[in-house]
Image (tube, rainbow, N blue to C red):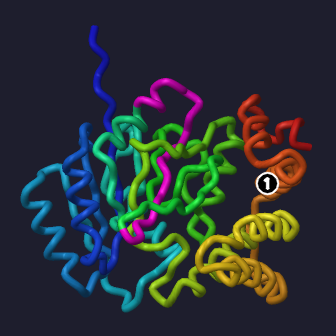
């Protein structure tokens, strides 16, 4: 008896993406394994985004548009997650095997989702995964240098059962880091692969903001603080990435975002079990490296892995 083909749904929050979205739309339409449904949430766009979405939805019945009122500005962090959940509310999650939060500023390789599903089917403990993001500069692809221990925020491909198990995305800056650690806490694996068939072009620099790249990096620092990242671990991470553009100051701005949030006494993620797990993981990563610390998490399905204590 033939197995039923896997069903996956894409959910794409967007606002004013007219400059980039056609490349994402075209490369999803051209996928070797198309999504069963694609819910695109227009979060109050004021450019040509609504017209472009209507054009594609008119051609492809599996594309559905959800429209939210214009709040007058682009909402990042919790705003993006809120928009995602507007799309999530439009589906019945149990109708699908996989769900993916997908940004509309990407150019995807043709077998992207087919390969991710093959990897998921081969490893039942794999909860979330993605390829790697590259920037295109002067005709060359430049890696954004993301770690392997989580799926990337712009293309969060999830097994539906895992997504439900971790409670979905937290509605706060740092949501796309918290989810990977929650996966490990629950005994799932989170990862991303840097392989030619899984490399996608990110048309907007990671950590950039509509208000400027340094604003985006400062926000990243707050996100790390909110999540519960320790200052020593963040400092080590910043130092290791000083040669990334914008050189030196981009990473130092992340560090300043953490320090400023600490000095202001800003709130942190209120989940003691998660915070304890995160600190144990980060302490272990400082000793043996993130790769080995992540591998040790994968060796057990129990929260609070003793090997990280």
Q: Look at 28% across and 82% down and name the residue there.
A: 45
Residue 88: x and y in percent read: 38, 56
Q: Look at 31% across and 67% down and name the residue there.
A: 41
* Left or right, residue 6 beside residue 270: left
Task: Choose between 146 and 177: the one closer to the eye.
Answer: 146
Characterize the local packing of mark 1: few (<14), some (14-19) or many (20 or more) Cα atoms within 10 angstroms: many
Q: Mark 1 sits on what residue?
A: 278
Q: Magenta stretch: residue 3 in it?
A: no
- Residue at disc 1, secondary structure: helix
Q: Look at 88% across and 36% down and name the residue there.
A: 307
Q: How many marks?
A: 1
Above or below, 164 against 19 in this view is above
Q: Magenta stretch: residue 128 in it?
A: yes
Residue 195: x and y in percent read: 48, 42
Image quarter of residue 309: top right
Q: Look at 82% across and 65% down and name the residue there.
A: 236
Segment tinted magenta in the rendering = 118-138
Could you tell me if residue 228 is visible in this image? no
Residue 137: x and y in percent read: 41, 70
Task: Choose between 292 and 97: the one closer to the eye.
Answer: 292
Query: Which residue is outermost to the left?
Result: 59
Could you tell me if residue 187 is visible in this image? yes
Residue 201: x and y in percent read: 39, 60
Q: Quadrant where the N terminus lies?
A: top left
């Amino acid at each position: 008896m033939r197995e039923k083909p896997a069903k996956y749904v894409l959910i794409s929050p967007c606002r004013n993406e007219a400059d980039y979205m056609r490349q994402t739309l075209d490369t999803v339409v051209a996928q070797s394994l198309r999504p069963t449904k694609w819910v695109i949430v227009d979060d109050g766009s004021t450019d040509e985004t609504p017209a472009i979405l209507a054009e594609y939805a008119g051609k492809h019945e599996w594309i559905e548009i959800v429209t939210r009122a214009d709040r007058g500005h682009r909402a990042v962090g919790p705003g993006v997650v809120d928009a995602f959940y507007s799309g999530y509310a439009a589906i019945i999650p149990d109708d699908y095997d996989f769900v993916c939060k997908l940004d509309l500023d990407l150019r995807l390789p043709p077998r992207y989702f087919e390969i991710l599903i093959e990897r998921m089917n081969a490893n039942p403990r794999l909860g979330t995964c993605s390829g790697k993001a590259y920037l295109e500069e002067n005709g060359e692809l430049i890696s954004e240098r993301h770690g392997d221990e989580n799926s990337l925020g712009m293309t969060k491909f999830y097994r539906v059962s895992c997504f439900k198990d971790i409670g979905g995305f937290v509605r706060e800056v740092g949501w796309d880091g918290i989810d990977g650690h929650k996966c490990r806490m629950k005994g799932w694996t989170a990862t991303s692969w840097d392989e030619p068939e899984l490399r996608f072009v990110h048309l907007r620099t990671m950590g950039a903001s509509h208000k400027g790249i340094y604003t985006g990096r400062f926000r990243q620092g707050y996100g790390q603080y909110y999540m519960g990242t320790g200052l020593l671990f963040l400092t080590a991470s910043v130092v290791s990435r000083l040669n990334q553009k914008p050189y030196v100051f981009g990473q130092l701005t992340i560090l300043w975002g953490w320090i400023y949030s600490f000095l202001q006494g800003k709130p942190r993620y209120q989940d003691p079990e998660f915070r304890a797990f995160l600190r144990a993981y980060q302490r272990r990563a400082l000793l043996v490296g993130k790769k080995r610390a992540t591998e040790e998490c994968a060796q057990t399905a129990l929260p609070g892995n003793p090997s990280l204590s």
